[in-house]
Amino acid sequence: MRLGLWLGLLVWGLGSSDQAAEAMADCQPGTTAWVWTAPLIPRPGQTLVVIAVALDGPLDTVLMTDPQGHTEPLQTRSGGGPPWSLQGRVLHPTAGLYRFAAIGNGQTLACTTLELGQGIGDRGSGRWDEATEAFFAAWIEHLFDAPPDESLSLDSLTPILQDARRNLLFNYLGLDEDRSLRAEPDCADLPYYLRAYFAWKLGLPISYRSCNRGTARNPPSCQAPIIETRFVGTRASVTSFREAIRRLMDTVQSGNGRTALADEATDLYPLALERASLWPGTVYADPYGHTLILVKWLPGDGKIPGRLFAVDAQPDNSVTRKRFWEGNFLFTETPSAGPGFKAFRPLVQSSGGWRPLTNAELIRQRVRPFSLEQAYLEPDQFYPRVERLINPFGLDPASAYESVLAALIEQIETRVQSVENGARYLRQHPGAVIPMPSGPAIFETTGPWEDYSTPSRDLRLLIALKVVEGLAERIRRYPELYVLDGEDPDKAAAQVERLHEQALDRHGITYTRSDGSPWRLSLRELYARRASLEMAYNPNDCPEIRWGAEPGSTEAATCRRRAPGEQRARMEQYRLWFRTTTRPPR
């Protein structure tokens, strides 16, 4: 276990007893499966977390042998795959030697032992190798796990990391390090924050770069990597983590994710559009600067629609789980960005210290190799490819409509909170006017405008409204994407049009007006207000205006605040961007 066999397995100190030596002899890590336990310093009576991860297929169970020699399967929760995982807990472990074996296809695929009460455990190889990346993916999946129909939306990342049931690394270092930690990354920071947090707990190095934002003709370019090694080989304090994460968050921005796909001087590299490559923890960088992180796959079976979930953060630091669809994951061919699914470049140690892997080295990887596949796809090819991964057996038109409709409603409901956040800020700052940037900077800036305006969100919402409304036409144009069972595409499309007409009145949202009263808007009303939503992103406007209320109407009668005239005049100039749902070049 100490001679390089670890391969990412977190193996614990066993003491020097004959019993421990005997147990070690027949308990070895696997080559494509590993077992991990937490916390770093296991103690009798303290809950022990056990997680097994595998690359080649689902695991059946984790067998636990306790100090008395009794063997039984742990009660576990499973994660999808790859990587596949099982996570369980030993609630009141006693002192002595434990053995945990990951079982798949009736065979022991990986095993580890630990002895409670015998000092600190082994944190592992300290490298971003195959096993470490698999554990990172499993940790991300469990961190954001929730029933598929349950909304997962939080004010920040803090409550997720402070939830010991979700966060398998909660108080992992035994320093009570998570109690006082405030985790408030925004959109671009979120994937880096999670990567750095994981590295802090497991004693790993991290790398990031200072990048520009690119131009209308060129994607962002980056400087030499900043290699952070303060976590390596030590139990770094929360103060040390705060210092490191502050420097990181002051450096990275949306340009880091939008670098050209073939560029080598990057933090992230592009992946093939294959289920085996798109693990939880994968970053999705859209062409306009928004980033999401994959957290869960629920493949469809031909009857129940599959779902691919991701999380993102907003400028106000809120974190929300979302499903993959065209309204959330924007993709387009543009010379100003390299969009798509990407992974962090692993770091390797050489004579000159730590360095990121090159593209050539990544191509030779067995797992998740470098691929330029996404560079050659148009949107009409990209979305069907990913949809096939989510629903490998296809979807009937009605199920396809219900799936995109549910995603649209989620998107609108999330906007309700964003508008309310802006209204609350101005209630707390009477008489304040949030300065509005000029030109394309309305989409990328800092300060209260970034925190409380919604131009990017509203652009995506207008795209989402088009996608749902246009599904029937898509069925007519691309019938091969759907399970029609011999039905005429025109007939199937007409059925979807009927479903859409019914949904317009059945679905809607409720927002809070300026006087605190609720106001309900049907989906039909929101569609009718698309022109108004082209100028609804300014937080200086009252909530009524931001939801498209007609001035002078009963709905708008409670409005008490309007954006300054010069801001509204500039919004009128920018209106074409929203009408054509085309974000302007920088």
Image (cartoon, helix red, strand yellow):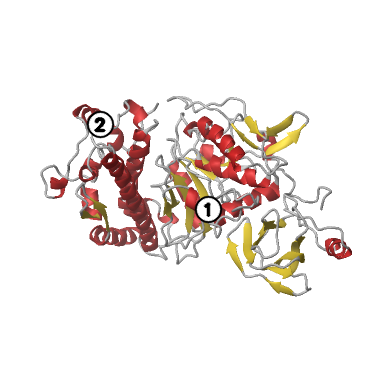
Residue drawn where x is 65% and y is 48% of the image: 133
Numbered-mark total: 2
| Label 2 sits on residue | 571
Q: In the figure, 497 relative to 232: above or below?
A: below
Residue farthest toward the right in the current orientation of the protein: 18
Residue 61 placement (x, y as % from top left): 67, 68
**111 up-or-down from 440: above or below:** below
Q: Is residue 217 above or below residue 477?
A: above
Residue type at the position of mark 1: Gln
Q: Is residue 294 left or right of residue 53?
A: left
Residue 203 visible in image? yes
Amino acid bearing label 2: Met
Quadrant where the C terminus lies? top left
The span from disc 2 to disc 1 (Cα, nearest Å) is 41 Å
Q: What residue is shown at x 50% (from left), y 65% (from top)? A: 301
In x, y percent, where is residue 63?
71, 69
Which dot marks residue 105? none
Q: State the residue at coordinates (42%, 66%).
A: 485
Within the image, what quadrant is residue 112 found in?
Answer: bottom right
Question: Could you say which is closer to the camera, residue 217 or residue 33?
Answer: 33
Residue 380 percent coordinates (x, y): 43, 44
Q: Indicate the secondary structure of the residue bearing disc 2.
A: helix
Q: Is residue 341 left or right of residue 565?
A: right
